[in-house]
């Protein structure tokens, strides 16, 4: 039972570098989400995809882009990393009404 | 807009005792869902319990129960018979369930629970 798989688990970048965080789910869920978690802030939604082919901004989208590659995969891209994007990033997916979101194990990203 | 407030940054409880973690919410949605997640020090997010706004009974899942008071807009998590493994960060979250296919969650800032032996 893989559930939601995120890669990589850890990454260190220099300011200005770009990278893509990968997320895949095997639960046949329609909706997928990217959150960031900062100390004392809880989880904040960056972008989400309600269904294959659609994406929408969440609470903190600036500096990020996303791609819903297919029903299984939802990637998050940092085009020009900034120290303020140092955080733990979680991908999640959910099915339909009343079903909880299932989370990946997170990616710990440090930007120097 | 939805808002979740968890007023207890940290809580301590003795092993085998019960503990209540507070959560209040604000929303204009007619139908909504309330969730609790556990985040141990290893970092993963673990779903604990769900309460729908139109559910007539409080949700229970093993040692977890949700004390849902709709008029007071509160959804407190009660953990009975605390165990050392319950030491973790706990997040309350909610989402609109009025319709459509967007089920994004709004999270509170969390409560760090420490269970003492």
Image: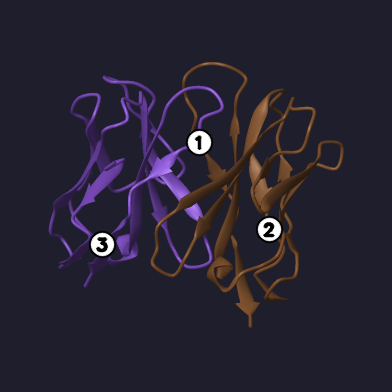
Query: Residue B110 or B61: which is nearer the viewer?
Result: B61
Subunit of mark 2?
Answer: B
Q: How far apart are marks 3 and 1 (CA)?
A: 32 Å
Image hue for chain B: brown
Point 59% across, 60% down: residue: B110
Q: Is residue B103 depicted above or below A21 in this figure?
A: above
Image location of residue A94, percent across then percent down: 42, 31
- Nearer to us in this view, B62 or B11: B62
Give the CA distance from mark 1 to mark 2.
20 Å
The chain assigned the colour purple in the figure is A
Q: Looking at the rendered structure, which numbered label has been put on residue A82?
A: 3
Q: Nearer the viewer, mark 3 or mark 2?
A: 2
Q: Where is residue A50 in the image (x, y as percent from the top left)?
A: 39, 24
Q: Which chain carries label 3?
A: A
Checking the image for residue A100, the label placed there is 1
Picture quadrant where residue B89 is located: bottom right
Residue at (75% x, 65% y) in the render: B18
In the displayed structure image, the side of residue B74 where residue B37 appears, left or right: left
Q: Name the residue under label 2.
A: B6
């Amino acid at each position: 039972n893989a559930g939601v798989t995120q890669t990589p688990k850890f990454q260190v970048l220099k300011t200005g570098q770009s990278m893509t965080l990968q997320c895949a789910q095997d639960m046949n869920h329609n909706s997928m989400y990217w959150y960031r978690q900062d100390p004392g802030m809880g989880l904040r939604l960056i972008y989400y995809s309600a269904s294959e082919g659609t994406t929408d901004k969440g609470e903190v989208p600036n500096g990020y882009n996303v791609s819903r590659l297919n029903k299984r995969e939802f990637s998050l891209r940092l085009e020009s990393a900034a120290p303020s994007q140092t955080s733990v990033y979680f991908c999640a997916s959910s099915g339909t009404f009343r079903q909880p979101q299932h989370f990946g194990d997170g990616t710990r990203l440090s930007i120097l | 807009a939805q808002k979740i407030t968890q007023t207890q940054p940290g809580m301590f409880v003795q092993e085998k005792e019960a503990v209540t973690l507070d959560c209040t919410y604000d929303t204009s949605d007619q139908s909504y869902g309330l969730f609790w997640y556990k985040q141990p020090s290893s970092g993963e997010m673990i779903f604990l319990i769900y309460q729908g706004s139109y559910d007539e009974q409080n949700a229970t899942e093993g040692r977890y129960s949700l004390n849902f008071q709709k008029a007071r807009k509160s959804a407190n998590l009660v953990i009975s018979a605390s165990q050392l493994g319950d030491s973790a960060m706990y997040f309350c979250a909610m989402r609109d369930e009025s319709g459509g296919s967007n089920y994004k969650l709004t999270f509170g800032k969390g409560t760090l629970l420490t269970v003492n032996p």
